[in-house]
Structure formats: structure tokens, C-alpha cells
Amino acid sequence: MSDGLTVLVVPTGTANLASIKAAFGRLGATVVMAENPDQIDAAERVVLPGVGAFGASMTEVREHGFHEPLAARIRAGRPTMAVCVGLQLLFDASEESDGVPGLGVLPGTISRLPATLRVPQLGWNQVEPGPDCAMIEPGHAYFANSYRAAPPAPDGWAAATADHGGPMIAALERGAVLGCQFHPELSGAWGQALMGRWLARSTTTGSTSC
């Protein structure tokens, strides 16, 4: 990647920041941690990571005042990547944390994986992009999740799916916004290439309103 790329990472209190920083560093990007809400509006590229509980992550985001500028930039289609719990935070709510509202950018409630499965899902799974996906290609990604969004994709979004006791949304994309239930930063060369495509798209794609 070219020099001068900067990625603003929103702290959720539970993210694997070392892996995120290392992956973007290999692509020539500099990672900066967000400290105030104004940075989210000003940033060219924002990453919302997460490892852990929906409620704890959403509380961290709200307490720092990040929720409103995050929702606004995603609705506007500005370059944003949401990873694992970060993707789940885009929805209205999650069964994991009753009474805790998400960002509400996407409609619906995140649900627990079927009780018949061993949870969490830890390991590699096949990702199959839908025909409208521009950034996501077929491949294997590393997942670490007990909850998931169910198909179909929300209106206006392209989805990739995976199967774990039934179909689940593995990733969503719209313009320069990319949400991954898996961890691209832990998904080897395939994940690194996906992050590179997002960085490239973030330099060429303008905002698109919902």
C-alpha cells in the first residue's frame, strides 16, 4: 500500500489491538487510537473492533461518546470497518445483552448460535460472498463467536455467508463500509488481502447515503 494511510481505531475495551495494528502495519498503514468523538467525524478511515460481550463493548462506545458519530459515518457510507463484535454493534440489539441498544444502523437483533452446537465457534470456516460483493472473495476465515446475524442481508447491503449449524452472515459491505463477523487480521493471507482491498477502496470511494 502507499504511504500516508492512517486508520483510526475505536477502543471498545475488548479488542485484540496488537493483531489489528500488526495487520494494518504490514499494509503500510498507521494505526491511531481514538480519544474523542470529534476524531471519528474527521478521520478518513475508522475501524470498530471487538472481542467479548456486546453489552460491555457498547457501553464503552457510549461512555466515550463515540456512538453518534459512528452511526452517522456508517449511514453516510464513509470508510469504516467493523470486526467481530464490532459488526454486531451495528445492529439494533443482541440476545447476549438484553436491554442494551446497539448503534441501530442495521435493523434486527443478533441471536445466539443454535444450542445444538458447541459454542463459541473457534476456528476456520468457509466464507461465500454473494453476487453483489465487491471486496469479499471466497476463502477461509478465522471465527471466534457465540452470536451471529442471520440472513438475509439488510436492504442495500451485500452479504457473504458461512455455515455453522445453519447459514449466518459472515460479512456485510456497502460502498466503503465493511463489517466482518470473522477476524480478517487473524485470517492469514486471505484476510490480509481483504483488509488491503478495504484500504484501497477507502481511498477511492466517496460517501453514499442510505
Image (spheres, rainbow, N blue to C red):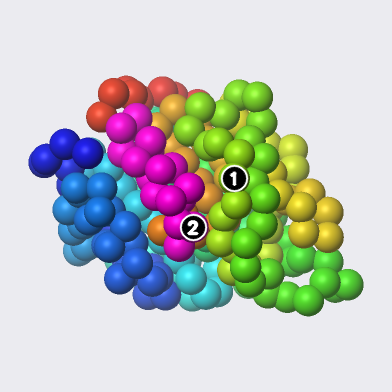
Taking the view exactly as shown, the residue that stands out farthest to the front is 189
Q: Inspect this view and state whether residue 73 appears.
A: no
Mark 2: few, some, or many residues within 10 Å (few <14, many ≥20)? some
Mark 1: few, some, or many residues within 10 Å (few <14, many ≥20)? some
Question: Circle 2 — which element?
Answer: loop
Q: Is residue 144 magenta?
A: no
The residue wearing badge 2 is 187
Q: Nearer the viewer, residue 22 or 40?
A: 22
Q: Which residues are magenta?
A: 186-202
Q: Residue at x 68, y 69 (%)?
A: 121
Q: Earlier in the sequence, mark 1 or mark 2?
A: 1
> In which quadrant of the rendered view does residue 124 lie?
bottom right
Q: Nearer the viewer, residue 110 or 66?
A: 110
Residue 104, horizontal then vertical, whole percent: 55, 48
> In which quadrant of the rendered view does residue 196 lie?
top left
Circles 1 and 2, Cβ within 8 Å, touching? The answer is yes
Q: Residue at x 38, y 71 (%)?
A: 16
Q: Residue at x 40, y 32 (%)?
A: 176
Taking the view exactly as shown, the residue that stands out farthest to the left is 4
Q: In the drawing, what numbered circle is on residue 104? A: none
Residue 140, horizontal then vertical, whole percent: 60, 52
Q: Nearer the viewer, residue 57 or 169?
A: 169
Residue 126, horizontal then vertical, whole percent: 67, 50
Q: Is residue 199 magenta?
A: yes
Mark 1 to mark 2 CA distance (whole Å): 10 Å
The residue wearing badge 1 is 139
Q: Is residue 168 left or right of residue 188?
A: right
Q: Amino acid at mark 2?
A: Ser
Q: Is residue 156 left or right of residue 184?
A: right
> In which quadrant of the rendered view does residue 119 lie?
bottom right
Residue 7, horizontal then vertical, whole percent: 24, 49
Q: Residue at x 61, y 39 (%)?
A: 138
